[in-house]
Each structure stands twice: as C-alpha cells, then as structure tokens.
Amino acid sequence: MFLGSSLKPFNEHLYISSPTMHGEEMKYVKEAYDTNWMSTIGENINQEEKICAEKIGKKYAVALDCCTSALHLCIKIAAQKLYGKAEYNKGSLEGKRVFCSDMTFAATLNPVIYEGGQPVFIDTEEESWNMDPVALEKAFEKYPDVKMVIYAELYGFPGKILEIKEICKKHNAVLIEDAAEAMGANVDGKPCGCFGDYSAVSFNGNKIITGSSGGCLLTDDESVAKTARKWATQSREMADWYQHEDVGYNYRMSNVIAGVIRGQFDYLEEHCKQKKAIYNRYKEAFADLPVKMNPIVENTNPNFWLSALIIDEDYMCKQTRSDCDAEFVAEKGKSCPTEILQAIKSINAEGRPIWKPMHMQPIYKTTEFVSVKNDVGADIFNRGLCLPSDNKMTEDQQKAIIEIVRACFE
C-alpha cells in the first residue's frame, strides 16, 4: 500500500521509452543538408529501404512518413488484389469484414475504417498477450468468407504468429503483420515483419530505433512496392505534367528523417540487449511479488521494447475506471495499476496502462468481438501496466522504480 515515498524525485523526467541517439545519425542528416536532398528522395531513403528490407528479410521496403501510412497502403493494396478496384469515393474494403488484433494501438485498425471495412476484433490469449489463434479460428467458423487478418505484435513480444499464418493459409486469407513495436524481435530465428504477406514497421520517437517518425511497408512483391511508392506520392503518373488516375496520399518519408533512421540501424541489437537487461532486472526483483511480467512464447526472442506486468487477481485492490479517469481504494498487501502508476509518477517517472482493447473503446462499442475465454484482453488491461523501459535508465533509477512498485504491495 503506497502512502508516499521517501525517495527523492528524479531531477529529469524518466520517460517510458525515449529516443537514444548516438551521433552517427547527424552524419547522414548533414549529408542530406549538404547535398540539398531535403525532400522525399535521396540516398538516405535508398539506403534506409535497403537496410530495412535486409533486417526484416523481405525483398522490398518502402519508406513512408509513419507506420500508420504503411498499414493503410498494405490494407488498400491487399484489398484491391482481393476485391478489385473500388468505385470512386468508396473504400477498397467497403462492407467487408476484417479480423483484427484487439489489444493494440488504434493505428493498427484505423486504416480498415479509412477503406470502409468492418473490423471484427479477435481476443487476446493469456500465453502471449497477442491474438488468440483459437479465437481466430472461431471467427473464421462464423465468417468463412473473410479474406484479411491484421495481426499486431504487442510491446515487442511475439505471439503465435506461425499458428496465425497457418490459419490464414487454411482459409485463403491475407495476413498483414503490424510489427510496429517488434523491430528486432524474432520467431524461430526469423525477424518479426517477415511473416505477413504485407508488413509494416515503425520508427516513431519512442520505438526501439527511431527517426523521430517514419515507417516502412515491407513486401516480397515488386509490383506491390511500386504501387505503394506511387500511391504515397499522390499517385502521380509517369508523365511530363501532373497526371493522376488514382487517389493518392502524401505519405513519403523525408530524406532527412531517413538519415536519422539510417544512422540508428547499427544500434538495433545493442538497444534490444539493453531493453532485455531492464526486463530481466524487473523480473528478478519482482520474483516474490504477486505479479507476472510479459510472457515469452517458446522459440521467440522479443526485442523487450516495453516491460510490462500483470497483478495476480487475488492481490488486486479495488479499482474503477471510467472512459477517462481511474480511482482505487488502497488496501494492505494489495495493489492495482492505478496505484502503481500514480506511485511511479510521484518520483517524476512515466509508466502507462496496458493498451485498452479496441472492443472497449467508445468508438468501437458496437463492433463485433470474438473471444473463447471470457474477454482475456479486458482482464489484462484491468490488471496490467507498462513500466519505465527507457534504455538510458540507470540501474539506480530502475532500483527506485522497483522500490516504488514493491511499496505498493506492503
């Protein structure tokens, strides 16, 4: 039961995960400046795409302004291949159902709405905190005509994507892999991002490597890469004048941003190693507490982007949450995410609740949801939280976080 701390607040705010820069990035940013390639073409973009494709194990990468744009183009291209080109002013998924991860950030499925589709949320499984293959199979039994599945990897900890992929193959469905949080993680030695028919990764400011923003679409199909580049550049045709035969988007990555990402790639493995050390210190320190850390599925190697924990049900104090507020009643020997997050905040550090499942969001309250174990995602959201996981966090700072969390259960 946390009643305040004798710990002195950190002088500087400890973020949950902030950019870690090394200096190499500025060499490539300066190269863009010196050569005056400040737009959406240039050598940084060429190299960023080449390196990203090699890291993920796909033939082609298309550098874009953010991962959401990459997901949008993945979904639109896949939809046109499945259903044909949409009528003018109609989305490519108009009226079509799409199976989507439920416990994720809204960006995973918002592009489904952009294209007029109907998300069907697939519940999370306890073993991985990712999409439940059993629930996905149940969804296909109900809607055997669905031809698209969007799967997100949570916090850099891979789930059972090989099973998901087999289920998609069985039902002739396209798999879109949202690997936004999973750059550097792998399954059976293969990188996350390589399993989808179409995949997307993120270089947002809080990701394991960053360009402050940015993302990539990944594919083995050259025609898909060409289409993505065209649509991302306002769908300009190859003509001397501005000729447009499709609706386009302003989605291309800046050559300056690409320079930052290019300079970060060499540090991906180092950042993963640092994040893993943070996770292991938390896990060891909390071994005697009624909590569990992010689960690690057999034959997977996470990137450990965000360390998270879930409190055992019998050790939860009373907690209530509205759409925007949370309250709790302190109880000796018990705690809850709201109490722990407030305690972390009291020493000038940042934690977060677990992603609130999409089927619980007000905007999607009438959207269909498929579960096999009584809403696992809602339970994880209720009992879980993300801990400070910044790879620049010192061991002394982490010890302070550990002390704060432990005090909540006294």
Image (spheres, rainbow, N blue to C red):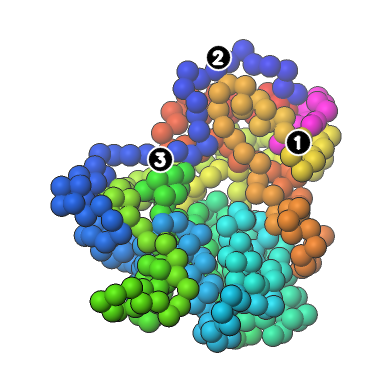
Q: Nearer the viewer, residue 338 or 145?
A: 145
Q: Which residues are magenta?
A: 327-337
Residue 401 at least partly seen? yes
Residue 165: quadrant of the picture? bottom right
- Which residue type carries mark 1? Asp
Q: Are marks 1 and 3 in contact (CB under 8 Å)?
A: no
In this rendering, is residue 72 above or below 342?
A: below
Task: Give the total number of marks visible in the rendering.
Answer: 3
Q: Residues within 10 Å of mark 3 (few under 14, many from 20)?
A: some
- Residue at 55% over, 28% down: 349
Coordinates of residue 384 in the picture (x, y in percent): 69, 43
Mark 2 vs mark 3: give the one in front. 3
For the residues labelled 1 and 3, the Cα–Cα distance comes to: 29 Å
Q: Which residue is mark 1?
A: 325
Q: Are marks 1 and 2 in contact (CB under 8 Å)?
A: no
Furthest-left residue in this view = 34
**Label placed on residue 19:** 3
Residue 149: quadrant of the picture? bottom right
- Residue at 83% over, 28% down: 329
- Residue at 72% over, 63% down: 123
Coordinates of residue 392 in the picture (x, y in percent): 41, 33
Quadrant where the N terminus is found in the figure: top right
Numbered disc 2: secondary structure: loop
Between discs 1 and 3, the one toward the N terminus: 3
Mark 1 vs mark 2: give the one in front. 1
For the residues labelled 1 and 2, the Cα–Cα distance comes to: 27 Å
Q: Which residue is mark 2?
A: 8
- Residue at 62% over, 12% down: 6
Q: Residues within 10 Å of mark 1 (few under 14, many from 20)?
A: few
Q: Nearer the viewer, residue 123 or 32?
A: 32
Between discs 2 and 3, the one toward the N terminus: 2
